[in-house]
Amino acid sequence: MHQNSFLSLGPHGFHRIAYTEFGSRETEQKLVCVHGLTRNCRDFDHLGEVLSKNFHVVCPDIAGRGYSDWLVNPSDYGFTLYISDMAALLARLGEEKVDWLGTSMGGIIGMILAAQPNTPINRLIVNDVGPFIPKESLSRIGDYLGMNPKFPTLDALEQHLRLVHAPFGRLTDSEWHHLAEHSAKKCQDGQYALHYDPAIAVPFKEAEPVDVDLWPIWEAIKCPVLIIRGEESDLLTKETAEEMLRRGPDAELVEIPKVGHAPTLMDDSQIALVKRWLNG
């Protein structure tokens, strides 16, 4: 695993985007993996190691998360900037075609990029997100977003993650420890905070909760798509997932039992289904 970064330009100046890499940069096949709303690139450590035998895997921290810079103006947190940053990352990779795996927010970014004319996205994996998002699920996310809690120990932070992210399903203690370790930011007072800018919640909370309809974007996608859905997900409903098979690109749907929003893709069986599809 290697860590790297680059400067990207937003409406209020430059900001640094950090990313981790797995495998050789000389490998022709590139896979970009992008995390969910409050997560970071280290969610993909195990997947990146497994797939690095055949892929150069690149996992960025979206602005305001992990080791990427926090933005000067919180109103800049949004898909316009995220897509611009990821276009800069794709240009940095310098490949005509790349594969994209996105969890939740990362999947939306991938869909928007894949829908563009002359897109470099060759194949797309969307993890528990689709072109219709019910406002109720967004309200649930908004309930914990931007709370900015502090924790006296890493164990306390881990217990918080186990509660908030219970829909991830049954993870091993080792997997929860990994999530906690890389979700933690040490504060000057010795306590721990979550490793993202609480201000990412500002534009989210300022907007009135409404259903998100991205069907025109979905229908503009031409590349093959793998849809991964947590069987108990409230964000990607079964009805939406089935409609995705009837409309838009050539797509395959796989459901993960006893998981809500969203499958972590840390489990060997979940990684195996990604590997199977990419190698198919």
Image: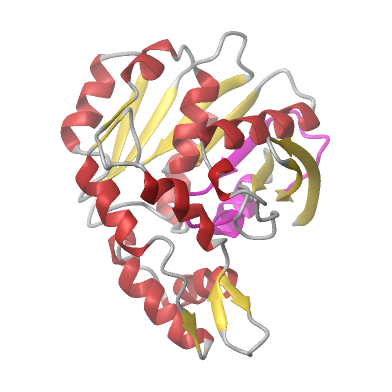
In this view, the residue in front, 30 or 19, is: 19
Residue 265 shows in the view: no
Q: Position of residue 192 (x, y in %)?
A: 56, 81
Quadrant of res 167: bottom left
Q: Is residue 36 magenta?
A: yes
Q: Position of residue 51 (x, y in %)?
A: 61, 45
Looking at the image, residue 38 lies above or below residue 250 = below
Residue in the picture at 28% in, 14% down:
247
Q: Quadrant of the N terminus?
A: bottom right
Residue in the picture at 60% in, 35% down:
81
Q: Position of residue 228 (x, y in %)?
A: 35, 39
Magenta segment boundaries in residue numbering = 22-51
Q: Is residue 104 magenta?
A: no
Looking at the image, residue 109 lies above or below residue 263 = above
Q: Position of residue 69 (x, y in %)?
A: 70, 54
Farthest residue toward the right? Answer: 26
Residue 5 shows in the view: yes
Residue in the picture at 57% in, 61% down:
197
44 to the left or right of 93: left
In this view, the residue in front, 63 or 238, is: 63
Name the colouring of the figure: secondary structure
6 to the left or right of 138: right
In this view, the residue in front, 129 or 73, is: 73
Quadrant of res 241: top left
Farthest residue toward the left? Answer: 239
Looking at the image, residue 249 lies above or below residue 59 = above
232 to the left or right of 228: left
